[in-house]
Amino acid sequence: MTIDIPQITLNDGHRFAEVGFGTYRLTGDDGIAAIASAIETGYRVVDTAVNYGNEAEVGEAVRSSGVGRDEVIVTSKIPGRHHGYDEAIASTRDSLATLGLDRLDLHLIHWPNPSVDRYVDTFRGMLRLQDDGLIRSVGVSNFTEAMLDRLIEETGAIPAVNQVEMHPYFPQTALRAFHETHGIRTESWSPLARRTELLSETTITEVAAAHGVTPTQIVVRWHVQNGSTPIPKSAHADRQRENADVFGFTLTDDEVARISALERGRLWDGDPNTHEEM
């Protein structure tokens, strides 16, 4: 049975899902099988990147899933070494060739890399590709409010999505408020705070017991109710289903606040003002 994951409308009129699927480190034949399984389960946002080294697997999984191409929202990301107007255009065309697809449904700048200071030109190149029909939605990843303000001021375009580190240990309250004001969709990487004790926190386990669901489902639901699209990753069909099956219950405002009170800050030294990836 396919899980029906609700969809929202981005600021450019294109659709997006309330829960997506991350593909980091899903490679080779096993990766293709895992990604295709997720699509068959009901995921419609599939997230990859040049730096993940698995765009070919994502494209093959989309084709082999049995789900129509127009139903799947494929996302990729431009790496730091491809910043610049012409470089972004060339990078995107390479991504499409690797994916074996004729368009990207959402394309992001992976990291702003402020010391390089070419993210505005990169965004302009992506907007050109959007005009040419090779990209549907244009967005960013790991951008701060100041960086978003600069993009909007210098290009006149508002990103559709900003994908950032977000989980109960780092709720991104101020950034999410900025996004809401500007109609930008928040998307959460590492939504379950991997390699931490989050899922065994007393607050999480108590709320899970109260609703008769798993701690994982509580955290995914917390993202949904905070207006963010989480992109959990799993190679296992049962966990893929668990991660997506969060629309049969609702957290109370008090429960959302209790979970958000677990805040402790960034976990992986990913401050966009200083952390850079090429």
Image (cartoon, helix red, strand yellow):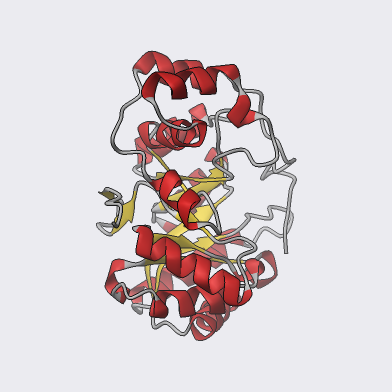
Left or right: residue 46 compared with residue 32: left
Residues 175 and 98: in front is: 98
Please say if 24 is above or below 169.
below
Vertical placement of residue 274 versus 118, above or below? above
Q: Relative to 158, is 71 above or below?
A: below
Quadrant of res 13? bottom left
| Residue 248 location (% of width, % of height) | 28, 35
Q: Is residue 278 above or below residue 275?
A: below
Residue 39: image quadrant is bottom left
Can residue 148 be seen by looking at this rendering? Answer: yes
Q: Nearer the viewer, residue 76 or 200?
A: 200
Q: Quadrant of the C terminus?
A: bottom right
Task: Identify which residue is drawn at 66% across, 67% down.
Answer: 51
Location of residue 133 (image quadrant): bottom left
Of 103 and 276, the residue lying toward us: 103
Quarter of the figure that contains the N terminus: bottom left
Identify the residue at horizontal 40%, vertical 31% (top origin): 226
